[in-house]
Image (cartoon, rainbow, N blue to C red):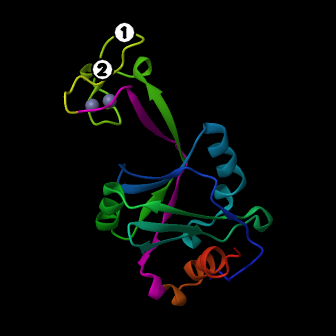
Amino acid sequence: MLPPDPLIPWFENFVGIAYRYFEIRMNVVPLFSDLKKAQIFWRETVHWWNDHSIKIRFVETGDTYWFIMGAESRQAKNNKYLFKVLPKSPHYERFKKGHEGGAYLRLGTHTKKFKKDVKDDSKCNCGHIKEDHEEGDDNDACLYEDCDCRKFETFQVNLLKKKKTVTNIKFLTEAEIKDDVLAWNCFSVHKYTKRE
Ligand SMILES: [Zn+2]
Ligand SMILES: [Zn+2]
């Protein structure tokens, strides 16, 4: 049981969530802008979570959804809950359909890469691969006529090895959250009592 505790700090200083098939379960991966931040967050917070107590809640609000995660910690003084409002994405929809009640929780990094950093078949954010972009250091534009991409840029996600198993995952509507302590707590703090 996760009591509503106003003293537990909410943490939203991460860049998003990746959903990846990796090993036998789907992975839910909070993404950090650099490896050090991810490692520190694991060491100080996630490491101390009891796997069976980890809860993830998804609450859809139009085109966005709230990602909410919390757990009991063996080191309560360092505990934090995560939350972030994110745009719905195909990866999210795939996870929603395919998770089968369980997931691995891993942390990851999300880094920007440029043409010189990647292989020829790497995909640009415009959807076309590196080979379809101009060659040379100063020329970068996509060669597809109907594409207005001027610079090859791609995001790479790296997963950290350490993982926890999460089996308490729920998708809720906003009307349903009053029956869920974790989601209710989060919405209370970040939506319903927000000071202007
Ligand atoms: Zn491009
Ligand atoms: Zn393109």
Q: Is residue 40 left or right of residue 164?
A: right
Mark closer to the observer (2, 1): 1
Q: Position of residue 104 (x, y in %)?
A: 46, 57
Can the viewer see residue 30?
no
Q: Quadrant of residue 90?
A: bottom left
Q: Which residue is the site of mark 1? A: 136
Please check the rendered image and state whether residue 39 is part of the magenta-colored stretch, yes or no.
no
Q: Looking at the picture, does residue 176 appear above or below residue 93?
A: below
Q: Looking at the picture, does residue 108 appear above or below residue 104?
A: above
Which residue: 39% across, 22% down? 118
Q: Position of residue 38 (x, y in %)?
A: 62, 45
Specify the label residue 120 is tagged with.
Answer: 2
Tell how many labels: 2
Q: Amino acid at mark 1?
A: Gly
Can the viewer see residue 35?
yes
Q: Amino acid at mark 2?
A: Asp
Which residue: 72% across, 64% down? 79
Q: Quadrant of residue 11?
A: bottom right
Q: Is residue 41 left or right of residue 154?
A: right
